[in-house]
Image (cartoon, grey):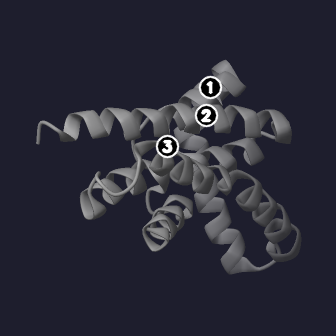
Amino acid sequence: MISKLIHLFLLSISPLGEAKVAIPVFFKVYGKEDISIHIVLLVGLFGNLLIYPLFYKLIEISNKRLLNNKVYKKYATLLSIRARKKTKTIVKKYGLWGLMIFVMIPIPFTGAYIGTIAAYIFKTDYKRSFYAISIGLLISCTIIAYGGNYLSTFW
């Protein structure tokens, strides 16, 4: 059981889809009988919540030390342009509420990683951005865990 939850946690913290992908994959691979849906939601959400503080600090440290490196600067610029393009309208218009809504959308590539980059790019308050992203993730993961679990009974 612990190894299954570790797999869920690692997939939830990875940029390959975060908990929005990890939770349904967990249910598909391991089934629903062994572990309570509440525990799956909590482990997936916890892994996803760790992204913001870890990734934000990584961005800060990397930009301080590596921004003079041409390769790093090229890829950091491309990633920030992509994040700005995806989030500009909603974050500029609605601020932190927009950031929360963007992260809340339960589809891949609208999660904590792009939300963190957007918070960094738009220089929003660290703590308030963390709360906005956390609430968005909580709503998204809950929709995925309970909604997906309910829908999978029909498949």
Residue drawn at (50%, 49%) of the image: 39
Left or right of 56? Residue 89 is left
Q: How many marks?
A: 3
Give the residue number, with chain letter if any, for mark 1.
98
**Res 123 → quadrant:** top right
Instruction: Quarter of the image for the C terminus: give it.
Output: top left
Q: Position of residue 26 (x, y in %)?
A: 35, 59
Which class describes the residues within 10 Å of circle 1: few (<14), some (14-19), or many (20+)?
A: many
Q: Does dot 2 land on a helix, a strand or a loop?
A: helix
Please identify, in this view, whether the residue under mark 1 or under mark 2 is nearer the observer: 1
Tag 1 and tag 3, C-beta contact below 8 Å: no
Q: Position of residue 79 (x, y in %)?
A: 59, 59
Q: Does dot 1 land on a helix, a strand or a loop?
A: helix
**Res 62 → quadrant:** bottom right
Which class describes the residues within 10 Å of circle 2: few (<14), some (14-19), or many (20+)?
A: some
Residue closest to the eye, 107 or 146: 146
Residue closest to the eye, 72 or 29: 29
- Which of marks 2 and 1 precedes in the sequence? 2
The label on residue 88 is 2
Q: Does dot 3 land on a helix, a strand or a loop?
A: loop
Question: Which amino acid type is shown beneath numbered disc 2?
Answer: Lys
Give the residue number, with chain letter if any, for mark 3.
110
| Up/down of 43 relative to 119, above or below | below
Instruction: Quarter of the image for the N terminus: give it.
Output: bottom left
Question: Which amino acid type is shown beneath numbered disc 1?
Answer: Gly
